[in-house]
């Protein structure tokens, strides 16, 4: 059964923050993903830079047109949060067979995928990654430069 469990972040308890997605390609062609989360509005501080690093898949959709993805009957351990880990999601299930080839060709088997979701008031961001995202507080206007080699 699909289950939404609390993903502990500085903004987890704030409903419907603004979310802006930043993406680029790494030097090896991998997708790199970051998000700016603004709990009290996109023009107010503090904001949080969420660095997901290399991601396997992601989607960012306007919250009014969010497909079901099988989540309608999901178990939710704690209501009214903005950040969750999704356990046993269809996304994770679809990557199960390829997980070994994505990470463990060197003989290791410790890396697993996580499905994370931020329920924003502007957009809903879903991410599948093996990384634990790094979250940094931003207290003043900042410029983020993204290189996109092609």
Image (cartoon, grey):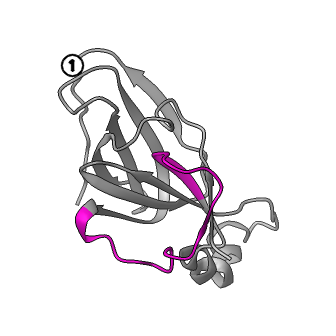
Residue marked by disc 1: 141
- To which quarter of the image does residue 126 belong? bottom left
- To which quarter of the image does residue 111 belong? bottom right
Specify start and end residues of the magenta stretch as a single range: 64-85
Residue 132 appears left or right of 108: left
Which percent across, then down, holds residue 52? Answer: 48, 47
The quadrant the C terminus occupies is bottom left
Front-lying residue, 135 or 6: 6
Which percent across, then down, holds residue 59? Answer: 35, 65
Q: Residue at x 24, y 50 (%)?
A: 122
Using the rendered image of the protein, determine whether residue 56 is visible from the camera's viewpoint.
Answer: yes
- SS label for mark 1: loop
Q: Residue at x 42, y 22 (%)?
A: 137
Residue 8 appears left or right of 28: right
Which percent across, then down, holds residue 100? Answer: 71, 75
Which percent across, then down, holds residue 99? Answer: 66, 74
Query: Residue 67 lies in magenta, yes or no?
Result: yes
């Amino acid at each position: 059964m699909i289950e939404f469990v609390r993903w502990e972040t500085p903004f987890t308890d704030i409903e419907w923050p603004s979310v802006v997605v930043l993406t680029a390609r790494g030097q090896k062609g991998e997708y790199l993903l970051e998000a700016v989360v603004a709990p009290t509005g996109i023009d107010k501080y503090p904001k949080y830079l969420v660095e997901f690093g290399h991601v396997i898949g992601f989607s960012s959709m306007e919250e009014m047109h969010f497909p079901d993805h099988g989540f309608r009957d999901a178990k939710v351990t704690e209501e009214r949060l903005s950040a969750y880990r999704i356990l046993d999601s269809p996304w994770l299930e679809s990557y199960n067979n390829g997980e070994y080839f994505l990470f463990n060709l060197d003989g290791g088997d410790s890396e697993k995928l996580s499905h994370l979701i931020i329920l924003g008031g502007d957009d809903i961001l879903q991410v599948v990654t093996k990384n634990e995202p790094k979250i940094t507080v931003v207290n003043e206007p900042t410029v983020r430069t993204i290189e996109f080699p092609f």
